[in-house]
Image: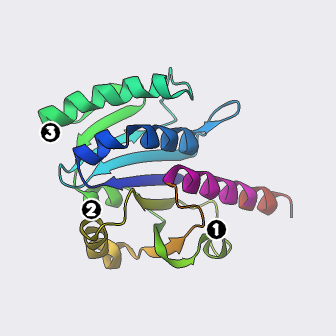
Amino acid sequence: MRHFIIVLRNIDEYRKNIYILIRCISAALMISHGLRRDSFITIHLLEEERSITFNPKTLRKVRPDEMSLYGIFKKSFVLLEKKRKNRKNIHYGVTYQASSLESTLLRYKGYFFLISNKGQLLWKILGKIDSTTNITFIIPLAETKAILSRIKSIVNTLKIARATIIPKKIDKQIVVINNELDRKIYWEKHD
């Protein structure tokens, strides 16, 4: 299972980067003939301590075009602005909930990687791990001191490794991660 957690500072950053986030959803979940069933993506807002998770196993009525995904994001704005604390289904397979970054990460098991400017090249790290285990990628939208210090505070607890990917645009990073994992899984089956 693959988990992508995109970390943003606050709702303003969420609002400003809506189209980048939509492309991230497409990159993480969409394939030519449907949805990836082995990838989850969560958008986490640090200051508000809220997260929005897209679960492909229950996701319905979603197309890869930006406008259909934009409708889902509009629904999430309402919940974020109301500062709603209880869990709520925004759309089929899309869940909003109040949670800290720590509790969001603790829901997942397996390997954890922080995608940043510093660290080993991702493809070298992926070559050493079992592709059948859960892998969580924490991808900050921007590497600000606030975001990195918050993530660093939980690095030791979860043993998060730093990894670097050549493309700097976040949606392209997700594409590269999926391609590397798909290639690894293919060769493991056909060796």
Question: What is the C-alpha distance between the residues marked 3 and 2?
Answer: 16 Å
Q: Residue at x 23, y 55 (%)?
A: 46
Q: Which badge, 1 or 3, is on the more N-terminal residue?
A: 3
For disc 2, the neighbor class at 10 Å (few under 14, some 14 to 19, many from 20) is some
Q: Main secondary structure of the magenta part?
A: helix
Mark 1, residue position: 130
Mark 3, residue position: 85
Q: Amino acid at mark 3?
A: Lys
Query: Image quarter for residue 138?
Result: bottom left
- Nearest the eye: 49 or 140: 140
Q: Residue at x 47, y 22 (%)?
A: 68
Q: Percent from the top left, x then y, of residue 90?
A: 32, 27
For disc 3, the neighbor class at 10 Å (few under 14, some 14 to 19, many from 20) is some
Element under label 1? loop
Q: Amino acid at mark 1?
A: Asp
Point out the residue furthest to the top here. Answer: 61
Left or right: residue 31 versus residue 4 is: right
Mark 2, residue position: 102
Query: Image quarter for residue 14?
Result: top left
